[in-house]
Amino acid sequence: MNIPSRLVIASRESALAMWQALHIQSRLQALYPQTVVEILGMTTTGDQMLDSPLSRIGGKGLFVKELEQALADGRADLAVHSMKDVPMHLPEGFTMAAIGEREDPHDAFVSNQYRRLEDLPGGSVVGTSSLRRQSQLQARFPALKIESLRGNLQTRLRKLDEGQYAAIILAAAGLKRLGLEARIAQLISTEHSIPAVGQGALGIEINASRHDLLQVLAPLNHAETASCVEAERGMSRALAGSCTVPLGAYAVRKGDQLVMQGFVASVDGSEILREQVSGSADEPEALGRALAQKLVEKGADRILAALPG
């Protein structure tokens, strides 16, 4: 194996993204002590356009385009992403070289006044940027008022602390990675809030022509997480999933099987379809498509066709 003398990691500049890049940097330096591993920090379109919900301005791909351009230009060798931010179809010329071990996949209820979602009085304002979270929240608690919440993790917590929201919903993984686990009032069960596709997992993207990097990055791939994420993305792809679509999927490995639950909903949560499948961990993509098909048979296509945009 040809070990490069220098590797450059492209990353967003938010605290969480930099934590992720530094984590991969330290892993690579431990594996290849002779290699100089640098981080190229970048501000993406998604980081700049904070006035509108993601579903309105083009989706989560806004967080990865600039990083992919750095890969295409040769300014960076690899890019580190939260898998939940990676569009279901990578642009031609790029590939995911490794998926790291998953952190806690749950959604987290964060509030300074209330310990549980169930304690929120009717009319309370809850902040989230996710149609997936919004639809599941509204289905369970129709009296809550859901308002858009954008910005990096620290910005969202500041808005909560300023009293703009009674509570906010965040990914537990990000809070834990930044040492902010104490802010979590309640972990919401995956039955009540099915996670985003790939939530809690890190992906390492490279230019598809860089075959030399596949072997170098292979030790960073966590096979169990990778198969679960592949199954989840298979479901989302089959349903044309993006952040404009309220859907989620969560797979777990049990022996040589994957067990996966998924849902599709109307934005207001008035209609929500859930299904579960299990099958061989060796064919995750097929399992994801099978779950999508079960949801279609229940009426998912009708719900998706009625969504704006």
Image: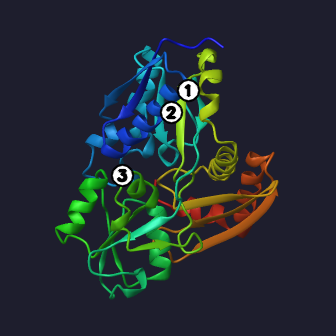
Query: Are the residues at dot 3 and dot 1 in contact (C-beta closer than 8 Å)?
Result: no
The kind of secondary structure element at disc 2 is helix
Residue drawn at x 31%, y 54% as measured from the top left: 153
Instruction: Identify residue for label 1.
Output: 31
Residue type beneath disc 2: Arg
Where is mark 3, residue-wise? 178
Disc 1 crowd, CA 10 A, few/some/many (<14, 14-19, 20+): some
Disc 3 residue type (three-letter): Leu
Cα gap from disc 2 to disc 3, whole angstroms: 17 Å
Tell whether 77 sits left or right of 223: left
| Residue at point 44%, 30% (across, down) | 25
Residue 81 location (% of width, % of height): 47, 39
152 lies above or below 130: above
Please report contact status of discs 2 and 1: CB closer than 8 Å, yes or no. yes
Say which of 195 and 147 sits in front.
195
Query: For the N terminus, which image quadrant?
Result: top right
Q: Nearer the viewer, mark 2 or mark 3?
A: 2
Q: Is residue 242 above or below residue 160?
A: above
For numbered disc 3, what is the local secondary structure? loop
Q: In the image, residue 7 lies at what x, y percent?
A: 46, 19
Q: Quadrant of residue 15?
A: top left
Q: Residue at x 69, y 42 (%)?
A: 223
Q: Where is residue 73 drawn, in percent x and y?
A: 43, 15
Residue at mark 3 to residue at mark 1: CA–CA distance: 24 Å
Check residue 27 in the rendering and tell me which mark sits there, or answer none.
2
